[in-house]
Amino acid sequence: MEALQKKFYLKSFIIILLSLMFVGLGMIYSSSYMFSKEEFGNPSYIFIKQVIFLILSVLTIGILSKSKFEFWFKNIFYLHLFFTFLVFLTFIPSIGVTIKGASRWLNLGFTTLQPGEFVKYTTLISAISYFHQFEGFTDRLRLKYGAILFFPLVLLMLQPDYGMFFLCFSNIIFACFLSSFPRKWFYGFLFTSVIAMSGLLVLAPYRVKRLMSYLDPWKDPMNSGFQVIQSFLGFAHGSFWGAGLGNSREKLFYLPEAYNDFIFSVIGEELGFIGVFVLVSLFLAFTYVGFKLVFSLKNSIKSTFGILVITTICFQALLNMGVVLGMLPTKGLNLPFISYGGSSLLANAILLGLFFSLFINTYVPRETSHMEFN
C-alpha cells in the first residue's frame, strides 16, 4: 500500500473510532440520566464518569501509539500474569466486588475495575506469541506457557463470567488458526474445546435456563425472558425513524442494563432503524478500513495481531447486537465504545494504541526465536 493511501486509511480509521466513541457518549447520557438522578442525585453522574474514562482512553491511545510494539510483545506473558493476578484478587472479599452473584470487579475506592476486560486482550497477544513459537518450544516450555495462557480462563469460569471466558477462548482459537500450528492438532483442539464448552454449558442450570429463554422468551416473560422482551418492545417502539433522542420508555427502569449491555436497544428505540443502520455501518467501516490497514503489513506477527484486534472488537459487537436482538442467548457482553464501562473503554484503548503503533512506528520485529521467554 502506498504511503498516501495508508495515511488516508489511517485517518479514516481514527475518524470512525472517534465517531463510535462520541455516539457512545451521547447514548450513555441519554440512557443513564434518569437512573443517575434516582440513584446518585445527579443526572450526569454516569455520563461524567464515562467522559473521564474517555479522556484517559484517548490519552492512552496516543501514548501507546508512539511505543514499540516489540517491547509489549516480548513482555506479554509478564503482563498476562499481572492481570491474571488482578482477576484472582476479585475473589478476596475485602477487595473484590460481587454484583448479582458474580465477583468480577476490584474496589479501587474511587471507582471499580474489571480485570477480565484486560485479560481478554493479554490472552489475545499471549496466544499469538505462544502459537508463533510453539514449534520452537521444548515440551517443558509448551506446558509452562500453555498453563500461563489458560489459567485466567479457569478464574473467569469461577467468577463466573462465561461471556468473558468465551471471548478469551475465541481469541485463543483465532490466534491458533492464524498461526503455523499443525492443522491436525488444531482441529483436534477445536473439537475437544467445543465438547468441553458444551459440557460447561449444561452443567450450570442458570446457563441452561438462559438458553431456553433464548429459544422462547415468552415462556417466562417476568423472569428469564424479561430483558429480551423489553428489548423487543424498545425496537418496536422505535420503528423506522425512532421515538426521538431522549424519548426512550424502556430506559425508565423497564429495561435492565439500559446504558450498558442493552444500550443497543435504546438506540433502536430512540433513533429507530436509521440509528441502528448508522451504528452498524460505523462498525462495518471500522472492520473494512481496519483490514485495509492490516493487509498492508508485511510482518506475520504484526499482521496476525492486527487481524485479531479488528476481529475481536467486531466479534464482540456482533455478539452484543445478536443478544439484544434475541438472536443469541443472553450473556454479559457490552457493545464496544458504545456501552458504559470504564474498564472496557480503557482496555480497548490499550489494544488500539498498540494497533496504531504498527503503522506509526516503522520498526519491524524479527521473526526469530529471540522472542521466546526463557
Image: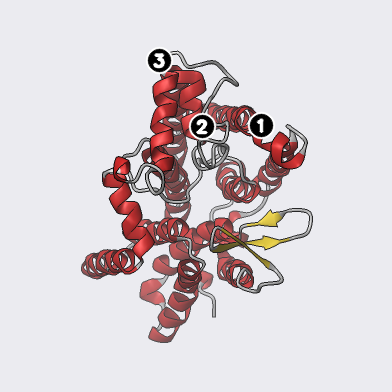
Please indicate whether residue 214 sits to the left or right of residue 136 in the image.
Answer: left
- Going from N to C along the chain, the mark reached first, 1 or 3, is 1
Q: Specify the label residue 34 is tagged with.
A: 1
Mark 3 or mark 2, which is nearer the start of the sequence? 2
For the image, the number of numbered tags is 3
Nearest to the eye among marks 1 and 3: give it. Answer: 1
How much space separates mark 1 and mark 3, taking CA atoms?
25 Å
Query: Where does label 2 land, which residue?
Result: 6
Amino acid carrying mark 1 in the image: Met
Determine the secondary structure under disc 3.
loop
The answer to which quarter of the image holds residue 241 is top left
Which amino acid lies under the numbered mark 3 shown in the image of this protein?
Phe
N-terminal-most mark, 1 or 2: 2
Q: Residue at x 58, y 43 (%)?
A: 356
- The answer to whether one can see residue 178 in this image is no
Q: Position of residue 336 (x, y in %)?
A: 52, 41
Distance between the alpha carbons at the discs numbered 1 and 2: 44 Å
Which residue lies under the disc numbered 3? 240
Q: Secondary structure at mark 2?
A: helix
